């Protein structure tokens, strides 16, 4: 056993992030570390590498107990981390990056020849022959990743941690990366592989550790764990929290309002088709990284669609900017409130009416009376708790911010509302309140496309669920067939008969 | 006794956090009042119409340019080209009414054109800045550096580097004239400030400017035409620089492309910073900018009137900026 982490606990400001989690990695073994957002994977890794200090538990490397106070110490002990955003100096050469901060010296000067030879030699072990004098930024993502790995190898790393290494790679590049991982294995290096694409996990990993809610819930050899079981362990089942809200009556006879046909862009969205009918909540499910948020952004015109068609009420549409989608009656409540939702320093009133501003215009001036009337109405209707509409939105709780953002779109009287993880980061009471609200709006005729990673949410509120896997829509499940098992099966990409799209 | 005092001091009005918040909000105004009080006591003849006029006319052009700068900075940008645009507009105006482009037949018309054309040209150059920032995604500081360098060159080429001296009462009214006893340039400044203030507060474009600076991604996702908003602020900044250029040459009765608006971009940025508008965007405190410009002007006047050389005044100006930014950052943390 190379690494053994046992009984690791960690709390941030009283909130437990890890509760007696464990992780074991053997020598020359590729260990998959999987779990949903917030499961505790990255906290566990950061404790291992010395970024955070643990509250409880033990870490043993090679049988000897270790305690890293900072990242430099874990690096010295042979642990290297390859992050999602690869931390190389983009304008410096490949050789310089590989030897950054430990440049070979001669007479007190950097020995460029030795550096070049060393870099070429280590890259050759990965079958990579590139010009090591060129800046790293000139190479593609896979090569950059390999340079980062080569850097780790020259530091005599015994354990390489890869955090979602394939998220921005295409298929060919993934194959190159996997070959690199196999080379590492052959030379006795262990790998912790954090990833979400199931096929990749099964292709490269020997064993798997699954985390949920800060705990390690399963460990197994990869071959002994079926995809279904893996997804089930990841998502868990806490269905009791919500009672079913959707009417059982079929909505399939209603007219289609929004149709997405074979949409694609880049490597994140490959082939997505889905429909949203009048007055229904259409769910969009899938594991992390399956392309749900990216699909929503394509529909909304926030990113450019490269392939496929979008139809609103049967007419083909090409939204180049969100403004065009909004003019057509589409709204998007985005996933990350802080990054692209709220304008933190502006008041609740201003935030709520941002999308509505053009309609509040009277000779260029904001119609303050109507603005106040609308803001007051939605604060009352959604039960937003605030001191006054003039309060900066950043002072509100997550649930109340989310309600303001919902109100922002409801005020525009949309025909299609896309909600991306509408209950992320808000407490359970506010969660069911927001779901009920969406259900009520759908019953009044609004078409809702609800993206969610919480199964119970989809089961409770959705009339129909489209499942994405690795950027493609793989199943569409009707309300009557909707069950935990059906969703899990589709996410794991093993379709039971009769439920295909 | 001590147990009562501890919580009281924490929530009291003079705790550190509150003090910085108050200083961040009213610091510029307090500094302004303090400077006036100081001058009333120390500087001879401070309380005279003469002193008021000198200070107001000196500050007018800075305020006009800084108003446009406030809008640009509110979107998270910056405009270094304002001084050079002043030189261009200042070079163009005399050329028009002195008949360099075409013979002047009707002086009233020529003067009217001398007001309009330079300002429009400066506005177009502002649009060019905006296009570099939006269309080509060039960082504002670099994009506007282009015209900062080239703009003055354009003005020098137009005039062959010659000093243009003129005497034209109609044109010079913008600087020398008086409306109800108040210098025309001061009236112009007040009108521009009032319009900008009302725009930020009451209009749709005003709210959109703040939203773009506050969170550009969120602004785009709410359908705000981010690029158009940015084009607009750079255009306004250019237009106002054009106006300021006219005022300066009219005041001097001469236009020297080497000197008009020299260093103005820094004075304007300083006024904005001292006035409490965050350089990171998301706020536009027009009144603060006016106060900021007044404070900087008063500091300079105070030092000059009391025999301190202009060079030393620059050091004090720099210290003021550091202090203002420091107070803002502290106020923001609390």
Image (cartoon, coloured by chain):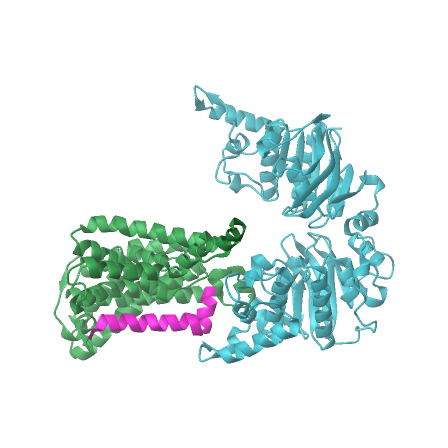
Chain colours: A cyan, B green
As drawn, which residue projects farthest toward the right? A497
Give the residue at x 72% y 77%.
A444
The magenta stretch is B182-210
Q: Where is residue A226 in the image (x, y as percent from the top left)?
A: 84, 46
- Left or right, B329 with reference to B164: right
Q: If the image is split into quadrants, where does the N terminus of chain A sit?
A: top right
Give the residue at x 70% y 32%.
A59
Give the residue at x 31% y 49%.
B319
Quarter assignment of residue B331: bottom left
Majority SS type along the magenta span: helix
As drawn, which residue projects farthest toward the front? B1
Which residue occupies the foreground of this view, B150 or A478?
A478
Number of labelled discs? 0
Which residue occupies the foreground of this view, B138 or A286?
A286
| B208 lies above or below B260 | below
Q: Is A275 within the magenta?
A: no
Does residue A414 show up?
no
Q: Where is residue B9 in the image (x, y as percent from the top left)?
A: 48, 53
Quarter assignment of residue A408: bottom right
Which residue occupies the foreground of this view, A425 or A114?
A425
- Left or right, A132 with reference to A296: left
Q: Position of residue A291 (x, y in %)?
A: 68, 55
Q: If the image is split into quadrants, where does the C terminus of chain A sit?
A: bottom right
Q: Is B209 within the magenta?
A: yes
Q: Position of residue A87 (x, y in %)?
A: 56, 40
- Left or right, A6 with reference to A143: right
Does residue B248 show up?
yes
């Amino acid at each position: 056993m190379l690494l053994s982490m046992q009984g690791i606990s960690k709390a941030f400001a009283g909130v437990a992030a890890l509760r007696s989690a464990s992780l074991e990695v053997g020598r020359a073994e590729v260990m998959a570390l999987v779990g949903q957002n917030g499961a505790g994977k990255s906290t566990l890794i950061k404790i291992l590498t010395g970024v955070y200090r643990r509250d409880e538990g033990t870490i043993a490397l090679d049988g000897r107990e270790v305690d890293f106070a900072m990242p430099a110490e874990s690096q010295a002990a042979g642990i290297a981390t390859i992050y999602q955003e690869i931390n190389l100096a983009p304008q410096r050469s490949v050789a310089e990056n590989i030897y950054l901060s430990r440049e070979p010296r001669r007479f007190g000067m950097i020995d460029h020849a030795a550096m070049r030879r060393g870099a070429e030699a280590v890259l050759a072990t990965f079958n990579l022959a590139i010009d090591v004098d060129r800046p790293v930024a000139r190479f593609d993502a896979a090569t950059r990743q390999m340079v980062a790995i080569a850097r780790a190898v020259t530091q005599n790393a015994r354990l390489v941690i890869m955090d979602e290494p394939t998220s921005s790679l295409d298929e060919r590049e993934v194959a190159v990366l996997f070959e690199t991982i196999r080379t590492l294995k052959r030379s006795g290096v262990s790998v912790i592989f954090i990833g979400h694409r199931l096929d990749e996990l099964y292709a490269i990993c020997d064993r798997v550790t699954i985390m949920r809610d800060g705990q390690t819930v399963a460990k197994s050899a990869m071959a002994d764990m079926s995809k279904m079981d893996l997804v089930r362990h990841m998502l868990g089942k806490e269905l009791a929290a919500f009672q079913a809200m959707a009417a059982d009556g079929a909505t399939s006879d209603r007219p289609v309002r929004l149709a997405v046909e074979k949409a694609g862009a880049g490597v994140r969205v490959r082939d997505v088709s889905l429909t949203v009918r009048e007055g229904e909540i259409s769910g969009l499910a899938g594991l992390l990284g399956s392309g749900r948020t990216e699909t929503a952004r394509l529909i909304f015109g926030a990113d450019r669609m490269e392939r496929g068609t979008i139809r609103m009420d049967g007419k083909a549409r090409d939204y180049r900017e969100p403004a065009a989608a909004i003019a057509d009656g589409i709204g998007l409540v985005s996933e990350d409130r802080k990054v692209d939702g709220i304008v933190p320093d502006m008041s609740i009133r201003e935030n709520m009416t941002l999308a509505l501003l053009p309609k509040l215009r009277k000779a260029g001036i904001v119609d303050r009376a109507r603005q106040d009337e609308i803001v007051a109405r939605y604060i009352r209707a959604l039960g937003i708790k605030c001191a006054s509409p003039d309060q900066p939105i950043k002072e509100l709780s997550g649930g109340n911010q989310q309600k303001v953002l919902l109100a922002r779109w409801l005020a525009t009287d949309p025909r299609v509302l896309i909600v991306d993880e509408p209950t992320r980061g808000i407490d359970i009471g506010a969660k069911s309140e927001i779901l009920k609200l969406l259900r009520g709006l759908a019953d009044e005729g609004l078409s809702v496309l609800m993206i969610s990673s919480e199964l119970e949410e989809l089961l409770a509120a959705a009339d129909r669920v489209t499942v994405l896997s690795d950027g493609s829509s793989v199943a569409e499940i009707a309300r009557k067939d909707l069950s935990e098992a059906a969703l899990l099966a589709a996410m794991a990409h093993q379709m039971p008969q009769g439920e295909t799209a | 006794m001590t147990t009562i005092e501890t919580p009281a001091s924490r929530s009291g009005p003079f705790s550190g956090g509150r003090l910085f918040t108050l200083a961040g909000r009213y610091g510029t105004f307090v500094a302004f009042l303090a400077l006036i009080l100081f001058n009333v006591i120390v500087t001879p003849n401070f309380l005279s119409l003469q002193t008021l006029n000198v200070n107001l006319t000196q500050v007018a052009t800075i305020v006009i340019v800084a108003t446009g700068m406030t809008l640009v900075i509110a979107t998270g940008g910056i405009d270094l080209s304002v001084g050079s645009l002043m030189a261009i507009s200042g070079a163009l105006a005399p050329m028009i009414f002195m008949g360099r482009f075409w013979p002047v037949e009707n002086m009233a018309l020529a003067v009217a054109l001398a007001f309009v054309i330079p300002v429009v040209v400066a506005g177009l150059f502002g649009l060019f800045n905006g296009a570099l920032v939006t269309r080509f995604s060039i960082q504002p500081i670099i994009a506007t550096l282009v015209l900062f360098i080239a703009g003055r060159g354009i003005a020098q080429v137009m005039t062959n580097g010659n000093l243009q001296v003129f005497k034209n009462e109609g044109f010079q009214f913008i600087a020398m004239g008086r409306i109800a006893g108040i210098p025309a340039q001061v009236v112009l400044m007040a009108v521009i400030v009032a319009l900008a203030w009302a725009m930020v507060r009451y209009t749709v474009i005003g709210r959109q400017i703040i939203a773009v600076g506050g969170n550009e991604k969120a602004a785009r996702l709410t359908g705000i035409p981010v690029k158009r908003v940015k084009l607009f602020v750079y255009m306004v900044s250019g237009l106002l620089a054009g106006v300021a250029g006219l005022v300066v040459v009219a005041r001097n009765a001469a236009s020297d492309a080497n000197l008009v608006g020299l260093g103005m971009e820094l004075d304007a940025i300083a006024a904005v910073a001292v006035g409490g508008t965050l350089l990171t965007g998301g706020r536009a405190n027009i009144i603060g900018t006016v106060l900021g410009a007044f404070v900087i002007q008063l500091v300079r006047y105070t030092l000059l009137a009391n025999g301190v050389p202009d060079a030393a005044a620059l050091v004090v100006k720099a210290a003021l900026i550091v202090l203002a930014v420091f107070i803002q950052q502290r106020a923001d943390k609390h």
